[in-house]
Image (spheres, rainbow, N blue to C red):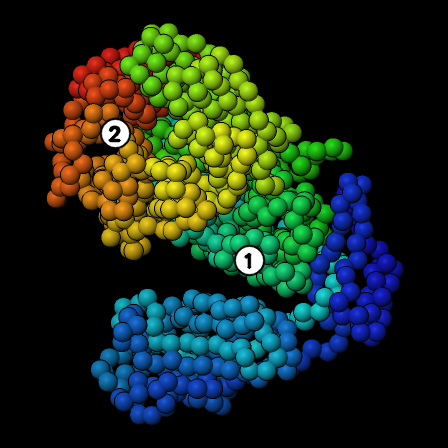
Amino acid sequence: MMRRLIPSLLSLMLLTGLILLLAGWLEAQPPASVSAQGLEQRNYLPLSLRQPPLPVILEAPTSLTPLLGPCPETFWYVISTDRGSEAYLTLNVNSPNISTNWGEWRPDLPEEGFYRVEAYIPAHPPITWCVSGRVKDADTSDAWYKIYHAGGTTLKNVSQAGLSNQWLDLGIYLFKAGGSGYVTLSDLNSEANYASTISFSAMRFTYQASVSKIILPLVSAPPNESQTYLETQVRNQQAFDSCNPPSIPTMQNWWVNSPYYIYNVYLGGASFAKGCQLPNASWLSLAKQQGWAFIPTWVGPQAPCTSYSARMDGNPAVAYLQGRAEAEMASQAAVTLGLVTSSQGRTVIYYDLEAYGGSSAPLECRQAVSAFINGWVERLRELGHRTGVYGGSCSSNLKELALIPNVPDNIWAAQWYTSQYDPNASVNGLFCIDAPPGGLWVNRQRIRQYAGGHNETWGGKTLNIDSNIADGEVAVPGLTLQAAGAAAQVIFDGPVVQDFAWLSPTQGYLLANGSLLWTEDGGATWQARSADRFSAVFFLDALRGWATAYPGGNGRTWLYATTDGGLSWQTLELNLPSGEWQPLQVAFQDESQGWVVFRSQTSRLFSRGILLRTRDGGLTWETVDLPLGETVTFNTPLSGWQAGGAAGNELYHTVDGGLTWQPVELLAQAASDDVHIQYRAPVFSSPQDGLLAAAVVEPGGGARIEVYATQDGGANWHLQAAIPVAEEIRFEFPLTILPQGGWIMGAGGQVLASPDETLQPTEGLTAMTQLTIGSLPGQITRLAFASSQYGWAITVTGACQGDKLGADFICRQATEFWKTSDGGASWQAVDAPGVE
């Protein structure tokens, strides 16, 4: 438990701080104590021991462009304010090409520190505009202020509408002394041209805190929760999260036909992934009515010792105030989204804290993170909300957050051990958090992310998701459903397949539920050949193969190698950077050249990976960072490809064996935010010949799969087919090159084949009916062909029956195996291999 500071101790420490200040020790380190767990306990709050400077008020912009003049020529309309000064109005525009008017407020600040910035919005009657004669009733609801501060530039989109002689809060920022910091506002916004007036009046800079590194303990009273209405529940149910919120029909389908009860909703933040989408209030209202509960999550700046573009300040005093500011923005986003349904309503909000090195991270970095989260939790509680933090079980150093003054109410720990849904998932057994001498956040205060990005099919709809088990607090807006005790029973018919391939028409292997199975008779019988619970496997031929396994409880990771088709295995321990890593892929081009890909355990909005490369058969390994936490395809020892990412819209190429990577924009639509693209990793039949598929979803929901071909190793790609499909197919469309040329693809339950055996370009759309050569029941998830005629397919179906809020709710997921001997025109069901 946290030790309470008694008044005498606080007085003594305040006196100590004053003495240090008088002595000039401005770089003194914060006081620390050591808990029974051997962790430093620190309290972070900047402290000013003298009278703060007076607010700096600029009654009007210090400069206007164009210079003030008659309205018809300059588009400035002058009004008088109740402050005895003038204000200036101009009409909005929504294109930079016609934007002409802007203003700047540049104060002369007396000293460095944190200042609250506020814009004054004066009252005025409806304006008859000087040029058009049109009457404008109100100021804009979308004013774009830019604050240029010591930490960079912040764009603040706020509403001036409805304000009458009031100050509009733009936030708290760090400024240097003097006039280096300033604020600008222009006529540019997102509204229709000339829809409203934009007001330029006074600007106030109010000193809030210094940046002194003297940091003394914080004593604060808990919030008065009797005045709030918590719209939260503790749920012990399964949850999923995705980059983009599924459509409302898909959410309804999954509510009826999946074992999930909770969905993670992202609220925004500086680190929210480009290409992903935020839900709106209408979406949340409809999903809530279906029965869903939510995990509201804010994705703000990350640890200062990471390479993310948005980072916390390295000074704990600054980071603390940043955390408070992020909490205010997250709270406002939650209200706007509809997560609270009354003026007294409050919710729970989690902060996405990505991996930053865990206990091996620099002390200064860990202190800044702790200070930031302390400010985040403190401010959310002041606003009446409950709090949580998402992060790697060890790599985000969650255990140290149990020692800050304002401990998060809940944690959401990422610790993956599978790549599929697990009906027996538990929040227990978390590394670092459940370590001796005792566990942390043990009173139903946990959510666990147990599986990273993978595809799941329920009710005929496939989504790419992370899977979670909750036994902690989630948001239930309005508490419309009391489903805290409901949980689905899940039955699996057939194994969950991770990979399978054919080496010849009779020899092949299958990886399912972590077990490696081998066949010598075309799948009639299968033999187990695993040495561990494998996560990935690859065979160069019928004898030489490699495999990786999920890390054990000690965090050690092994590479397995065989030279007798898996009858026996040799092991080699792989040395990885600190953090939680999931083995994703192992592959070899020959007996010397090979690689292993590991994916960092991150939230759905991040994708990080590392590549271990060997050129001597595994005797030595080189580790390099990857742009994505995805598999790698090498068509030559130097030329390689990665595709996917958080939103699926990233494609990278290397020409130096993975040391450096360059982004590739294959589709012209990639530059449009309205078009959603999901690339699949290229497949090659030779160093020169390859295919790459991408799903393209247009505004309004039209979707197609585009297949590109290369005959020069990827230097040039040409479109070979553009196939209109249902939107949900974009998550699962396996593509394989046939040994004799051409390709076969699964699209939903349809089997498609290339028009011919060449890789020549075509023009225009190709109807699915023109390419369909066969069909299967369910979603085709895997295709593998040993020849142009002989191949296998795997389909998955999932559905549920009963009352989702009752004890009779049962979900069943079936995996079925099929084989063809006529190139996919007809298929015969075969018995699924038995897998424990």
Q: Residue 320 sits in which quadrant? A: bottom right
Q: Residue furthest bottom?
A: 69
Inspect the image, locate mark 2, and give the three-letter code of the amino acid beneath it.
Ile
Inspect the image, locate mark 1, and give the three-letter code of the amino acid beneath it.
Arg
For numbered disc 2, what is the local secondary structure? strand
Q: Work out whether mark 1 precedes mark 2 in sequence or the reverse, and give the earlier one.
A: 1
Q: Residue at x 27, y 74 (%)?
A: 97
Q: Residue at x 30, y 47 (%)?
A: 676
Q: Is residue 617 above or below residue 333?
A: above
Image x and y of residue 173, in percent: 57, 69
In the rendered structure, the answer to whether residue 30 lies left or right of residue 659 reads right
Mark 2 Cα-neighbour bin, 10 Å: few <14, some 14–19, many ≥20: many
In the rendered structure, the answer to whether residue 253 lies left or right of residue 299 reads left
Q: Residue at x 69, y 77 (%)?
A: 52
Residue 737 numbered mark, or none: 2
Q: Is residue 431 above or below residue 79?
A: above
Q: Nearer the viewer, residue 406 or 86?
A: 406
Residue that numbered label 1 is attached to: 311
Q: Is residue 171 visible?
A: yes
Q: Nearer the viewer, residue 496 or 372?
A: 496
Q: CA distance from mark 1 to mark 2?
A: 44 Å
